[in-house]
Amino acid sequence: MGSISKNITEQEDMEEAEERWPEAVDQLKKAETLKKQVEMAKKKQIIDTSTDLRSQESEKRIELSENGDVRKEDFDTAEDCYRNIYMLEGKLSGCRLQAKITPQDDWPVEVRSLATDRLIAETYGNKPKAVQIKEAVSIEVPDVVSIQLVPYGIDVDRITSELHKKKKELSLILEKYSAPDYNSLKSKMSTAVKLHQELSILRLEIRSCEQGYDLNQLIREIADYPKELPALDELEDEVKLLCGSDTLEMFIGSTKKILESYRDRYVSEKVLAKKMKEIQEDQDRLLKLLRSIDEIPEEFTLIENPDGYADQLKESIEKLKKNSETALTTWSSAYRALGDTSAEEYSEAVRQREQEFEDQKSMCSHWMHIKDVFSRLKSEMKGKPTAGIEESFQKYLAAISKNSISLEEMRDNLSTKLVSGRHPLSVEILSDGTKDTISLAFRLAVLEYLYPDGGAVVVFDDPFTDMDPERVEESCKLVQKFAENNQVIFVTCDNKYRKLLNGKNIDIARK
């Protein structure tokens, strides 16, 4: 015969198992079904997102095809031809003459440009005519005489031959890309570069979305799934309702362990019911026996070993005394360490440090994003990728600092070496105003590089508070210039910017 306390504990465990066992079986089945549904819903989400991205990619490819995928080698050749044509035509334009032409015996006289063969003037019928000549020309009396007027020291035949060659070479490239002129080809080239960049971004997004899955295989799996698939957010709500803060995997694992422990202890629900019946019968016999012993107080009827119980109480009392003394000592030391600072002040200090930490995390995330975009663009470019940023950075530094700070070197990883005169600068020796100057110059340089055609959205939150007035004025001019092609939001509490910046003023008053 076992003790009453032991029987009660075992009976409670069995009652819990009897209630929880079938519930755990149902929950496990539901969780495993939910897990499969979530997996399929996520795959469907991948299909939908990837299909949309691939559709965008297809549209960009069509747009690129319609625009013309201008090869860089062809554009470089066309640009070289265009510059040479401009230079050669300039060489044939280096003169200023006025000719008075009087035809004789009704012979017509033609004045044509040697550079373009354009008819400049024509006269006939004994009528004198004054002609302004600003370039190399030929004066011809058909079937009689041909005269060339050219700047001194110019080899017209060589230049016109080279000019014809370059024009023909340029014409072939323009015809290849259906461009009426060089500027149209340049526009097509710019559009093609932009479309290639957008296609590269879309390809990265597609790879990130598909996560290495075979899209066609996913489509087949979804098509073969026998049940109607709820939306992913609905399934996630069901998971949360079933699992609470646990993941499905954790919930399934813990439920399986519960069922395994029940099977290890009780084999089956039928065996459990039989054991519960035996425990109840044993419990009834023990209670019947105890009720016959009236001299034992009721609160001690469940004690199995009185001596052991007394020793246990003594041990607990000693342990509690020691714990009380230790707690009192710890409290006294902590109270003395607080000094004159109140708990509220410590709480405020903690809150400020947490806010500073979050601000630094946000700033870090901002710069990491810029680094990621720059690294991606760098991998797609040839030559020195920082050349554009370096040039703009130097320009903005010179403008804001009145040439007192200059950029000596910028490496591919965007690390810089700055000098003031001949003296190198480091972060440790910079004033807050100089740091703001360098930060603004670098920020504008990167934005100009990332958005060469404009279209950027930039927010400045009182960025010039530590600058001197001259630098503030120069900085405002640069921001104003940048805002011509970009959206700039400037947040400040200082009214002086109403005069320094032109734009729409929005006043926000605290109620």
Image (tube, rainbow, N blue to C red):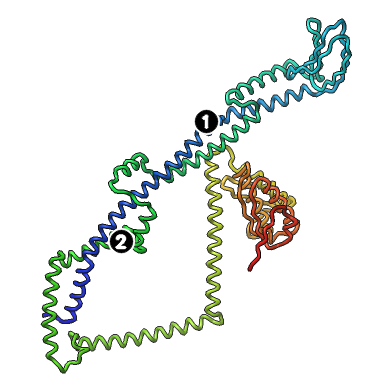
Residue at position x 37%, y 41% in the image: 215
Residue topped by disc 1 = 65
Location of residue 405 in the rendering, given as x and y in whole percent from the top left corner? 70, 52
Residue topped by disc 2 = 251
Query: Is residue 435 among the parts visible in the rendering?
Result: no
- Label 2 vs 1, first from the N-terminus: 1
Location of residue 30 in the rendering, given as x and y in whole percent from the top left corner? 27, 57
- Vertical arrangement, residue 140 with respect to residue 39, above or below: above
> Is residue 131 shown left or right of residue 296?
right
Total of numbered circles in the picture? 2
Residue at position x 31%, y 87% in the image: 318
Residue 136: mark: none
Q: What residue type is labelled 1?
A: Ser
- Vertical arrangement, residue 132 with respect to residue 38, above or below: above
Local secondary structure at mark 1: helix
Residue at position x 35%, y 86% in the image: 322
Distance from label 2 to label 1 (Cα)?
53 Å
> Is residue 192 shown left or right of residue 257?
right
Location of residue 76 in the rendering, given as x and y in whole percent from the top left corner? 61, 29
Query: Image quarter for residue 389?
Result: top right
